[in-house]
Amino acid sequence: MTDAPLVHTRARELTEGVEVSQRSNGQRQLSFLIVPWDKPTEVAELIDGVPTLYTESFARGSLDRALKAPHRAAFQIDHPGPYEHQRGSLERLAGYGHKFEDSAEGMVGTFTLYPSQADRAVELVTSSHRWASVDFVSITPRRGVEKAGAHIVRRAAHLNAVAAVVDPAYTDANLLAVRADAEHARELLAAESAQRESMLGALGFLVGAGLALNAEQLEWLAAHDVDPATLAAGTP
């Protein structure tokens, strides 16, 4: 495990729509909800090379750093590639953060579009690219808390960039692979747990009937950290 900051990417459908406006100087802007508050969401990602499935939510105020320096958050079209998370590649850049608002529902971002990219950006966001992808680094809690089955509450985070993307379910093959691996691991764990409970039930029945366990059965109990005495008590 490395101590380097882990850049997370989250995508959500823009079900609330996108507001397109124009400033007095002619610059066009896009406004939409980028992160909802206190809404648990399933996450599947690679943590130190391990497929990990957990849930996550953002506490209100967790993105307050963006309120003070909105221009530091890039707005881009499509997912960034490797090493592009900090500001986005020049080919993907379409604008920059103008302001962020802490609403009751979540963080609302307003982005100013570069004139040369405005027409394309507006067309894509109002047609095919109706998902927002957010890149951030968690400050509180620090990296390392992302464990399988855990629920993580982000209380402070640094917002790197926001991208308009097509439905990630069809484009992010890596995410699908991670999710598939994590779900497969979860199925294996569930099957192993069911098998363990079944074996404990069978051994408990034998002990309850006054029968002695053989060496193989005792070895199985030892391997699973179960005291044979607890079987008679019914509390393995």
Image: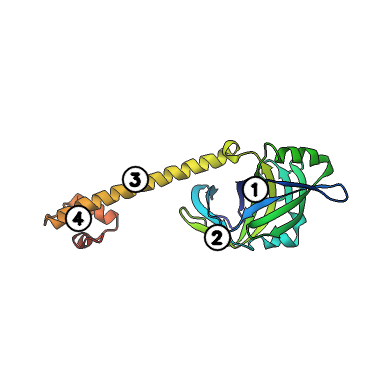
Total marks shown come to 4
Q: Residue at x 33, y 50 (%)?
A: 193
Select label 3 or label 1 by which is in front: 1
> How far, Cα to Cα, is label 2 from label 3?
29 Å
Q: Is residue 230 left or right of residue 100?
A: left
Query: Callout 2: 10 Å neighbours few (<14), some, many (20+)?
Result: some
Residue furthest out toward the right:
25
Image coords of residue 151 (percent x, y): 50, 57
Query: Of callouts 2 and 1, which one flags the residue occurring earlier in the amino acid sequence?
Result: 1
Q: Name the residue tied to disc 3.
A: 191
Query: Of callouts 3 and 1, which one flags the residue occurring earlier in the amino acid sequence?
Result: 1
Q: Is residue 230 left or right of residue 32?
A: left
Secondary structure under tag 4 reads helix
The image quarter in which residue 236 lies = bottom left
Image coords of residue 51 (percent x, y): 50, 46
* Residue type of the residue flagged with mark 3: Ala
Query: Of callouts 3 and 4, which one flags the residue occurring earlier in the amino acid sequence?
Result: 3
Q: Nearer the viewer, residue 144 or 118?
A: 118
Select label 1 or label 4 by which is in front: 1
Instruction: Say whether marks 1 and 4 touch (CB < 8 Å).
Output: no
The image quarter in which residue 156 lies = bottom right
Q: Name the residue tied to disc 4.
A: 204
Q: Name the residue tied to disc 1.
A: 16
Image coords of residue 202 (percent x, y): 20, 50
Q: Nearer the viewer, residue 94 or 17?
A: 17
> How far, Cα to Cα, is label 4 from label 2?
40 Å
Image coords of residue 179 (percent x, y): 50, 43
Query: Of callouts 4 and 2, which one flags the residue occurring earlier in the amino acid sequence?
Result: 2
* Residue type of the residue flagged with mark 4: Gly
